[in-house]
Image (tube, helix red, strand yellow):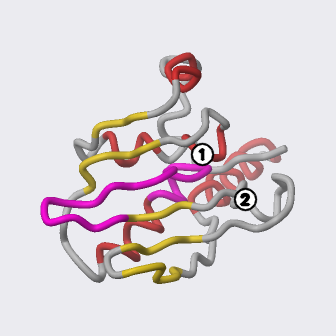
Amino acid sequence: MRYLLSLILLTLSLFGFDYHLKSYTMAEGVECFFGLSSKVNEINGGNIVNSCYIQTDEGYVVIDSGPTYSYARQAFQFIEANSSLPVKFVINTSSDEVHILGNGFYQERGAQLLGPLSYKAHQGKNNTKHQTKVTP
């Protein structure tokens, strides 16, 4: 019974993490979410990366998808409230997990993923496509 309760609580915590994202307008059509200046921990859920959305006539270009699938979903919901354009490209500036683990969210929606050569080494390793939380 104790294991079942632990499993239920763990499952709920994975889907319930709120990043409390706040968008900053950097220029017309450019919105950014700024991460915290700290190391990954249980409290920040990996939100230590900056992520930006550039609006074009055909859709968005995302710069760094964020630390988790949940982060990407929450950021996209915020952006989608302003415009219903799709995400066309995701540009990963690093292969660090906090920059790329939101990629699965956008890939499911047809976005093309771009990044450094080191990024390709992470593709196919483990199943991080739906990772919802980063922990130290």
* Mark 1 residue type: His
Q: In the picture shown, does residue 112 fall above or below 63?
A: above
Q: Nearer the viewer, residue 1 or 118?
A: 118
Residue 74 part of the magenta segment: no
Name the image quarter holding the N terminus.
Answer: top right
Q: Nearer the viewer, residue 25 or 43?
A: 25
- Element at label 2: loop
| Label 1, residues with CA under 10 Å away: few <14, some 14-19, many ≥20 | many
Q: Which residues are magenta?
A: 54-72
| Label 2, residues with CA under 10 Å away: few <14, some 14-19, many ≥20 | some
Residue 41 placement: quadrant: bottom right
* Number of residue marks: 2
Q: In the picture shown, does residue 13 fall above or below 3?
A: below
Spot occupied by residue 116 in the image (x, y as percentages of width and height): 52, 28
Q: In the picture shown, does residue 38 fall above or below 122?
A: below
Disc 1: which residue: 99
Q: Residue at x 33, y 55 (%)?
A: 61
Spot occupied by residue 58 in the image (x, y as percentages of width and height): 13, 59
Residue 73 placement: quadrant: bottom left
Residue 65 part of the magenta segment: yes
Left or right: where 129 falls relative to 86: right
Tell me the CA gap for discs 2 and 1: 9 Å
Disc 2: which residue: 48
Q: Nearer the viewer, residue 8 or 95?
A: 95
Q: Nearer the viewer, residue 14 or 37?
A: 37
Spot occupied by residue 15 in the image (x, y as percentages of width and height): 56, 59
